[in-house]
Structures are given as C-alpha cells and as structure tokens.
Image (tube, rainbow, N blue to C red):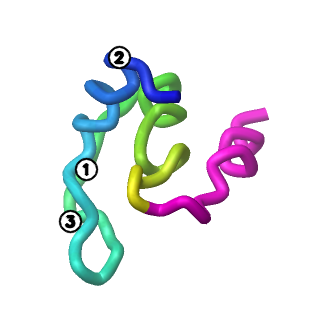
Amino acid sequence: MLTDVKIREMSLLPPFTDDGLLPEGDYELTFEQLLASTLVIGPAENQEWAGEWRRKLDK
C-alpha cells in the first residue's frame, strides 16, 4: 500500500519515456527515496512488477 510519503518520493523521478527509460540526466535520491521510487516499487499500472524482489537488492 502506498503512503502519501511514498507517493511524494516517487515524484522525484520523472515518468518513463515511451521506450520504458528514464529521460537522460542525473537524479539525486537518498537510499530511502530510491527504495520508495518507481524503480523499486514499480508503476501503479503494472501488476507484474517484481517490487518484492527489487527491495531485496538493498540487502
């Protein structure tokens, strides 16, 4: 379940392009922000995203 904090942290990254990539650039995130980002928890519309597996990568 997404909290208001996680939703705000997700907005620190721009949306993916039509090719499924982040736009070119540098994105400064703390480790906590990265773990709460779409790179880990995935986009809301994708039910097959491996968020649990991605969260294990921080260990």
Element type where label 1 sits in the image:
loop
Percent position of residue 38, x then y: 42, 47
Which-is-in-front pick, marks 3 and 2?
2
Amino acid found under the numbered disc labelled 1: Asp
Residues at marks 2 and 1, CA–CA distance in whole angstroms: 22 Å
Location of residue 7 with respect to 50 vertically, above or below = above
Q: Total marks drawn?
A: 3
- Marks 3,1: beta carbons within 8 A: no
Identify the residue under disc 1: 26
Please give the residue where the numbered disc 2 appears in the rendered image.
Answer: 5
| Earlier-in-chain disc, 3 versus 2 | 2
| 10 Å crowding of disc 1: few (<14), some (14-19), many (20+) | few
The answer to if 58 sits in the magenta stretch is yes
Instruction: Tell me what residue is drawn at x 68 percent, y 40 percent.
Output: 55
Q: Amino acid at mark 3?
A: Pro
Kindly give the residue lying farthest to the bottom in the view shown: 19
Residue at (71% x, 44% y) in the render: 52
Amino acid at dot 2 = Val
C-alpha span from label 3 to label 2: 23 Å
**Which residue range is magenta in the image?**
46-59
Image coordinates for residue 27, horizontal then vertical, percent: 28, 44
| Quadrant location, the C terminus | top right
- Hey, which quadrant is residue 9 in on the image? top left
Which residue is pictured at 20% across the width and 65% down the height?
Answer: 23
Going from the N terminus, do you reach mark 2 or mark 1 first? 2
**Which disc is residue 23 wearing?**
3
Mark seen at residue 55 = none
